[in-house]
Image (tube, helix red, strand yellow):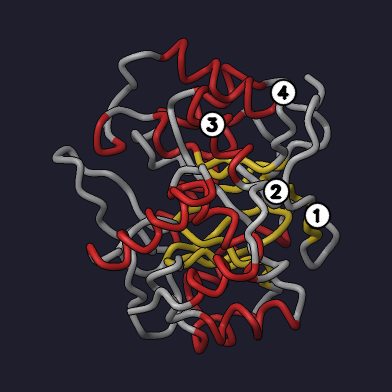
Amino acid sequence: MTSSTTLPGGTFTLPGGLTLTRMGYGAMQLAGPHVFGPPADRDGAVAVLREAVRLGVRHIDTSDYYGPHVTNEIIREALHPYPDDLRIVTKVGALRDAEGNWPPALRPDQLRQAVHDNLDRLGLDALDVVNLRVGGFDTPEPGSIAEPFSVLAELRDQGLIRHLGLSTVTADQIAEAEAIAPVVCVQNRYNLAHRADDDLIDALAARGVAYVPYFPLGGFTPLQSGELDAVAGRLGASPMAVALAWLLRRSPNILLIPGTSSIAHLRENIAGAALRLPEDELARLDAIAP
């Protein structure tokens, strides 16, 4: 598969030399409702992945606990053998129980099994990046992460993982992890209306570490949504497109992983992220805050 489009935002090279497209694709929504079970349209999910790669996406974010197992199996079906420049980022640290809950899975044996599960279902000999998920969906949980991160560092030393990242963590936890092994990326909640990580983003940018925000439209109040809708209306764009364009403008180390199960929505996301934000509208967006 080859790229036919130059993606907005270009690329970003992580510490250690791995290059990702700043516009990526998050595979979570390829699973069934509530990220549980198979999708209603598996062929459609395969088509979305193939279209993402055709459009130039070379950064796919996934996890074997999405489904569970569903998204990784679909990724392999759709894209294996993988393009040489495609980078797959996964995460460990949780699992799915029979009721669809997301209990933590941070014991050494659970982490080792999770890494091997990702390798097996993706059909890879080594994983490009593995993120250790520590907190819940949007809130870091304070405390030491030395033991679970050390397990991943050992697997990296064994050649099963190339690079390590963190998800839903505090600045102190990042510093603790960096004393054990290099951290190349951080996935935390961040968007126009939720900017608790402003200082962290700038600190990571100074060190060349990527920041990957999730929930790019999550947590808005009606007033904030109204302001975003107004800007989007004046620009003739969707609110999602404006939010993605603002994130790309916010800092060069921000990488985006919007997810969708629709080819039309995928194309809108990619085109929308190229949206030019006039200075007056950018100022209005910057003023949206909790």
The amino acid type of the residue labelled 4 equals Arg
**N-term-proximal mark, 2 vs 1:** 1
* Sequence-wise first label, 4 or 3: 4
Q: Nearer the viewer, residue 58 or 252?
A: 252
Residue drawn at x 72%, y 56% as measured from the top left = 158
- Nearer to the camera, 11 or 100: 11
Tag 1 or tag 4, which sits nearer the N-term?
Answer: 1
As drawn, 128 above or below 82: below
User: Which residue lies at the image location 46% right of the left edge and 48% below the top edge?
Assistant: 240
- The mark that comes first in sequence, 2 or 4, is 4
Q: Residue 54, which numbered label?
A: 4
Mark before the other along the chain sequence, 2 or 3: 2
**Within 10 Å of the Cα at label 3, are there few (<14), some (14-19), or many (20+) other Cα atoms?**
many
How far apart in space, not on screen, are marks 4 and 3 (Cα)? 12 Å
**Side (left or right) of 252 relative to 216:** right
Disc 1 residue crowd, few under 14, some 14–19, many 20+, Cα 10 Å: some
Q: Amino acid at mark 2?
A: Asp
Q: Write down the residue under mark 1.
A: 18
Quadrant of res 245: bottom right
**Comparing marks 2 and 1, which lies closer to the viewer?**
1
Give the position of the C terminus as an image quadrant.
bottom left
Q: Nearer the viewer, mark 2 or mark 4?
A: 4
The residue under label 3 is 266
**Viewer-side residue, 261 vs 147:** 261
Q: Residue at x 60, y 78 (%)?
A: 201
- Crowding near pointer 4: few (<14 within 10 Å), some, many (20+)? some
Instruction: State the image coordinates of residue 86 (x, y, percent, origin top left).
Output: 74, 36
- Mark 2 vs mark 3: give the one in front: 3
Looking at this rendering, what residue extends furthest in the top direction?
A: 43
Image height check: is 290 above or below 44?
below
Single out the mark in the foreground, 3 or 1: 3
Q: Which residue is mark 2?
A: 128
